[in-house]
Image (spheres, helix red, strand yellow):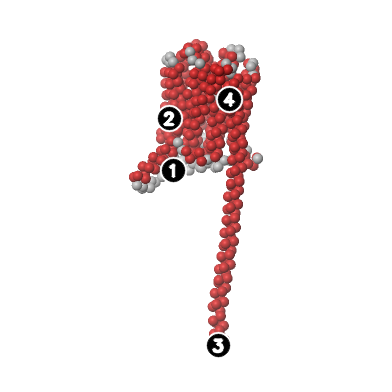
Amino acid sequence: MSSTLNRKMPPAPADVSGPKPVDGGWGWMVVLGAHISIGFAYSTPKALSIFFKPIKEDLGASYSEIAWISSIMLAVMYAGGPVSSVLVRRFGSRPVVMMGGLMCGVSMVTASFGSSIVYLYLCIGIIGGWGLCFNLNASLTIISKYFLAKRPLANGLAMAGSPVFLCFLAPLNQYLLGHFGWRGSLLILGGMMLNCCVAGAVMRPVARHSAPPKEVDQPNNAKSKGSRLKKVKTFVDLSFFKDPGFIIYLVGNVMFIFGAYAPIVFLSAYAVSQGIEEYSAAYLLSIMGFVDMFVRPLTGLVANSKWVRPRIQALFSFAMVFNGTFHLLCPLMRTYPLLVTYAVFFGVGFGMVFALIFECLMDLMGNQRFPSAVGLVTIIECFPMLLGPPAAGLLVDIFDDYKYLFFMCGGVITTGGLFLFVMNFYNYNRLEKANRGKETAQNQNTVENQERASREAQMELMDSEVKETNTAQPEYSQLGSN
């Protein structure tokens, strides 16, 4: 089994068209910018849950209706992946991230004047979701351009922005809520999110030294048809579905995303329902974020080691099972010390998964295909993202108890992790047998070619001997006659 897991998925194609990654230098400034933009992208939908209770009371909405705010925001962030990928290919990461930061700031400022839940869906969910989408995809793409050997570490540091920002946004939002209300808090948060424009400004493109490819003259019809096909393939490349490794990754990832965010959205409310004071309940998110903040770069370091990197898919499976197990145990934790323990282990599992989730995709697809792959993955993930938190909120509305949402999320995530482990193990064995079969066939062809060459050499030798005999016989007959 160890030798099987030591074999990676089909090798990703090398990026031969672009410049060689520098693995350092200005790349670390790019990681810092990605840290900020990714931090806002992932922490904002979670930290907004602090405002859900006063918004619910002010607008007279139910738990499932309130949960749609974060759900729509996350779904749009994921669904816009292909559009973001096209924009990054056309304009580069810098302007895309700066536009995303501007959209995020505008969304929060306009949402502060909202008087209906549908208005918040539009401002926070749709406009804010598009802004976060531009921040996330462009940041991930430019990291893959700057790093190769140190890419797991760079991804871990960039993805650590989510827990770092969640660590201070959760108590900050609680403080702002107590002094300015949810409307004033959203106004201030919008101003803070304009810092993503500054983060995007440091993402200068990688200098290219290769000469542009020469174009071959083609008929106009062939050119236009090829151009259209290329544009469609750039937007959504369906050829990924021919790769079994990609399909396995996608199924497990969808199951994780379905159950990943609902426990975060309802953690504070669950703690309050157990008699925990509101500020203490908000600090549970900070504790989770604080632990997550250190786990992500540490996971990146571990994943970058020679022993673990070939087995990174197995580590990803373990992280999912670890995460889901503690969701299943959460309903047993009713006191604040136990909830703090849950938040710590939740942060460990969540940090491991998100430090590896995109690195595993890069490992499968390579730098050249990653932008298209991440766009396709995110647009598919928008469906479980959209349905997960509202489904959890519906369970709370029906049973008036939070434990069922933790059972649902934990069960789905654990099943997804086990699915990844079993199917990757099966796929590794299949690939190993296929490789052995190819090697055996090549060896047989080599032996047959050698035998054929030996037979041909023997035939040539026999032909030469016959010719020599035929030329010698007339000479003997001439001598006899003399």
Counting from the top left corner in percent of width and height, residue 370 is at 49, 37
Considering the numbered disc 1 on the image, is that residue within a helix, a strand or a loop? loop
Mark 1 in CB contact with mark 3 (< 8 angstroms)? no
**Cα distance between the residues tagged 2 and 1:** 24 Å
Considering the numbered disc 4 on the image, is that residue within a helix, a strand or a loop? helix
Residue type at mark 4? Cys
The one of 387 and 348 positioned closer to us in this rendering: 387
Which residue is farthest front?
398
Residue under numbered circle 1: 210
Mark 1 or 3 closer to N-term?
A: 1
**Discs 2/4, front:** 4
Residue type at mark 1? Ser
Counting from the top left corner in percent of width and height, residue 359 is at 54, 34
Mark 2 in CB contact with mark 3 (< 8 angstroms)? no
Compared across the picture, whether 224 is left or right of 318 comes to left
**Discs 4/1, front:** 4
Residue under numbered circle 4: 409
Residue under numbered circle 2: 96
**Cα distance between the residues tagged 3 and 4:** 108 Å
Which residue is farthest bottom?
482
Number of marks: 4
Mark 3 in CB contact with mark 4 (< 8 angstroms)? no
